[in-house]
Image (spheres, grey):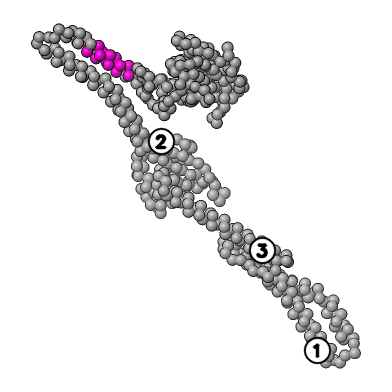
Amino acid sequence: MKLAHERRIQLTAMAGGLPAIVTALGILWTGDYTSKVQWTLSSIILVAWFAFANSVRELVASPLRTVANLLEAIREGDYSIRGRTTSLDDSLGEVLEQVNAMGTTLQQQRLGALEATALLRKVMEEINVAIFAFDGENKLRLVNKGAEALLGRPVERLLGETADSLGLEDCLKGEMRTMTRSFPGGTGRWGVSCSTFREGGIPHQLLVLTDLTRPLREEELQAWQRIVRVLGHELNNSLAPIKSIAGSLGNIVERDPLPDDWKEDMRHGLNIIGSRAESLQRFLSAYTRLAKLPSPTLAATSIEPLVRRATAMELRKKVEIVSGPEFTIEADADQIEQVLINLTKNAVEAGGDVRIGWGRTSVLAGPRLEIWIEDGGPGLSNTANLFVPFFTTKPGGSGIGLVLCRQIAEAHGGTLELKNNTGKPGCTARLLLPLASHDSPAIPIGVTV
């Protein structure tokens, strides 16, 4: 095909110069020339004509052959070859320049793809999860070292196997979930994530199995350690003085004769023992209350009556209510009321004027009902331990009030936060609860009733 194309170029060049050649030969043979001169000149003219046609063919065909070779190399995946041209002023030179630029671009893209693939493979080998990729026929096409260890077989014996033969058929059903399974490489609780991707236009499934047993055990161990520390601290605080006073009272009873004031010492010691025992009982009751918080029973709850009932429980100081729009949400009224009672109590004990209000706000998760309680006290001095169980700065405090409030808020799908006020004393507690998007629009908060 290349020879035919080049022949057409040559014939075109020859046809382009044919009128001039015919004219020159006509003048030569009709003129007064000898036969020898006529044949000699005719031969020279014809040879020159063929040489001109061949040079034109080479001038056009050579760049085209170069372009064809470059395109063939690109098609074969070799992007390192470049074409050389002597001039960029003609059209063929511009074509050759663009083909060279395309080769450079494809070479850079291939290099980037190779580097990205190498990075992906490195990441897959280093992460501590098992990764499988199955094609449309559920045959394994990709596996990492974590997956090899999980199935207890090398990659050479895994590729091409079906999900059913590997015991992973049930893992490909659904998206994200947890399950308890036994594999050759381990037994425990696993996080299962299954998603779909396309390669070469063919859908594939990507399966990721994460071992949750070790993290759960570590979290469980840390939780037990925290509980033991708290319980040990509280028990020692109560049992140490009880033991000391009991020993002192025992020494008094063993004296013979008894001292004159032994009754008063006994009464004082027993009062201390009773006080410490009562403190220990309050601690255990608070701990039990925190550990046994029931799940909320959701029902339609109007906000304004709920706020007014909670503030009416505070008799030490009048709480100013800042009206907001009317809202009815799905919540456990008793639990939310308990949260508002606790927060109002903390605000009153902080000092200064106390105000409470509500309104509509928006966060990334969607619209929220915001109930805020503001005090005029000195503010929060230690925000790091606000929600640490049994941490308190109040004399006789249990240290579970805010923890219980946050637990109730999160059980309703909401949040609780406390922040110091900006530009004025005191702090503000904000309780955010989920709110349907079709509820009342935001109304400016600030009208006192």
> Type of residue at label 2?
Met
* Residue 26: quadrant of the picture: bottom right
According to the picture, the residue beneath numbered tag 3 turns out to be: 97
Q: CA distance from mark 3 to mark 1?
A: 45 Å
Q: Residue at x 45, y 46 (%)?
A: 132
Depth order, front residue of 417/296 = 417
Q: CA distance from mark 1 to mark 2?
A: 99 Å
Q: Residue at x 35, y 17 (%)?
A: 396
According to the picture, the residue beneath numbered tag 1 turns out to be: 40
Q: Is residue 186 above or below residue 32?
A: above
Find out whether residue 276 is within the magenta segment: yes
Query: Closer to the N terminus: mark 2 or mark 3?
Result: 3
Depth order, front residue of 317/92 = 317
* Image location of residue 201, percent across then percent down: 57, 49
Find out whether residue 258 is within the magenta segment: no
> Helix or strand or loop: what does disc 1 sit on?
helix
* Image location of residue 28, percent across then percent down: 87, 85
Nearer to us of marks 1 and 2 is: 1
Query: Closer to the N terminus: mark 1 or mark 2?
Result: 1
Q: Is residue 95 above or below residue 283?
A: below
> Type of residue at label 1?
Thr
Magenta residues? 269-283
Rendered-image quadrant of the N terminus: bottom right
